[in-house]
Amino acid sequence: MIRTGLILAFGVIAAQGALAGNLSGCTYKGIPLYGKVKVVTSFPDIKVKVVKSFPDLKVKRVSAFPNQCGQWQFVDAFADFKVQFVESFADIKIQYVDAFPGVR
């Protein structure tokens, strides 16, 4: 019984580590996590889930100059990358903030 619990605990930790492994600094699979962002319903570069706690990235919405980690300017054209908001099977989890954006 204890062995099963330990295996389950290590599996959860490994799964969390696998997601964190995809974030390298302020990038996800080579895509910088700042800049101009277009929201799409299909064929995204990144699938994103919005959470209220324990995010992979804290995002601050800006209206211009999104040049620091976690600063996103939402646009309709000429985006740096595309995101799709999902409830499950997300690539990264984000939390919207008013200050101190970036990787936790």
Image (tube, rainbow, N blue to C red):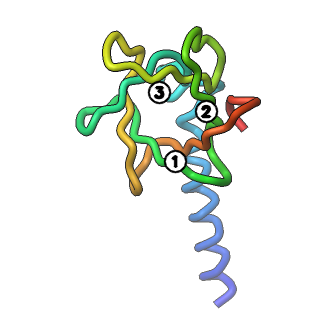
**Left or right: where 80 falls relative to 54:** left
Q: Secondary structure at mark 1?
A: strand
Mark 3, mark 2: which one is toward the viewer?
2
Question: Are circles 2 and 1 on residues that touch, CB within 8 Å?
Answer: no
Element class at badge 3: loop
Q: Quadrant of residue 25?
A: top right
- The amino acid type found where label 2 is placed reads Val
Q: Is residue 90 left or right of residue 9?
A: left
> For the view shown, which residue lies furthest in the bottom direction?
1
The earlier-in-sequence mark between 3 and 2 is 3
In which image quadrant can residue 101 be found? top right
**Which residue is labeled 2 in the image?**
59
Residue nearest the viewer, comparing 11 with 102? 102
Q: CA distance from mark 3 to mark 2?
A: 18 Å
- Horizontal side of 68 relative to 64 (left or right) equals right
Residue at the image point whose x is 40% and y is 56% from the top: 88
Q: Residue at x 62, y 26 (%)?
A: 70
| Mark sitting on residue 29 | 3
Instruction: Identify residue for label 1.
Output: 50
CA–CA distance in space, label 1 to label 3: 19 Å
Q: CA distance from mark 2 to mark 1?
A: 10 Å
